[in-house]
Amino acid sequence: MGKGFKMLISCDKATHTCDKTQYDEASLWEKIKLNIHLLICKACRKYSSNNGKLTKLIHKSDVECLNATEKERLKVNLNNELKNNQ
């Protein structure tokens, strides 16, 4: 096999790939190497598990975000209050 054929990856690379997988940005080859790494690394398995739990919580949360107008109004009000209290 050539130099480019590496099955084992470092923990840093594994956690980065885990994060990419969370956002559907990892390639198939990256996912394969990650799964091989997870077979042998308990710490990265835990990281991956926690990442999965976080993703599920975020997807099922019912959080409403402020729109751009509301954010701007909040920013203006905060700046006004800061100026009044100086």
Image: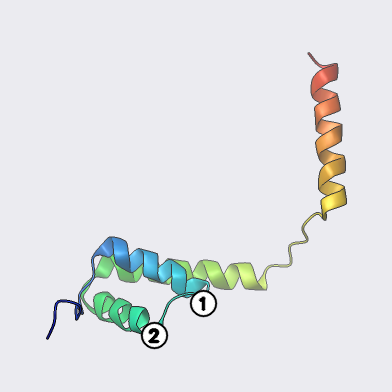
Which type of secondary structure does the marked residue at label 1 adopt?
loop
Point 81% across, 31% down: residue: 78
User: Which residue sits at x=66%, y=73%?
Assistant: 60
* Residue 76 x, y percent position in the rendering: 85, 34
Drawn side of residue 64 relative to residue 11, left or right:
right
Q: What colour-coding does the image apply? A: rainbow
Q: Quadrant of residue 65?
A: bottom right
Q: Residue at x 86, y 26 (%)?
A: 80
**SS for callout 2:** helix
Choose between 13 and 49: the one closer to the eye.
Answer: 13
Please give the residue where the numbered disc 2 appears in the rendered image.
Answer: 28
**14 or 56: nearer the eye?**
14
> Would you name the residue on which mark 1 appears?
24
Task: Mark 1: give few (<14), some (14-19) or many (20+) Cα within 10 Å.
Answer: few
Quadrant of the image for the C terminus?
A: top right
Label 1 is placed on what type of residue?
Asp
- How many marks do you count on the picture? 2
Q: Residues within 10 Å of mark 2 (few under 14, many from 20)?
A: few
**Left or right: 1 as drawn, with respect to 25:** left
**Horizontal side of residue 72 vs 20, given as left or right:** right
- Seen at 82% across and 19% down, the residue is 83
Q: Position of residue 45 (x, y in %)?
A: 32, 71
- Vertical order, 24 against 51 (above or below): below
Give above or below for 78 relative to 35: above
Real-space Cα distance between discs 1 and 2? 10 Å
Quadrant of the image occupied by residue 31: bottom left
Q: Nearer the viewer, residue 48 or 14?
A: 14
Q: In the rendering, at what x and y percent does residue 77 appear?
A: 86, 33
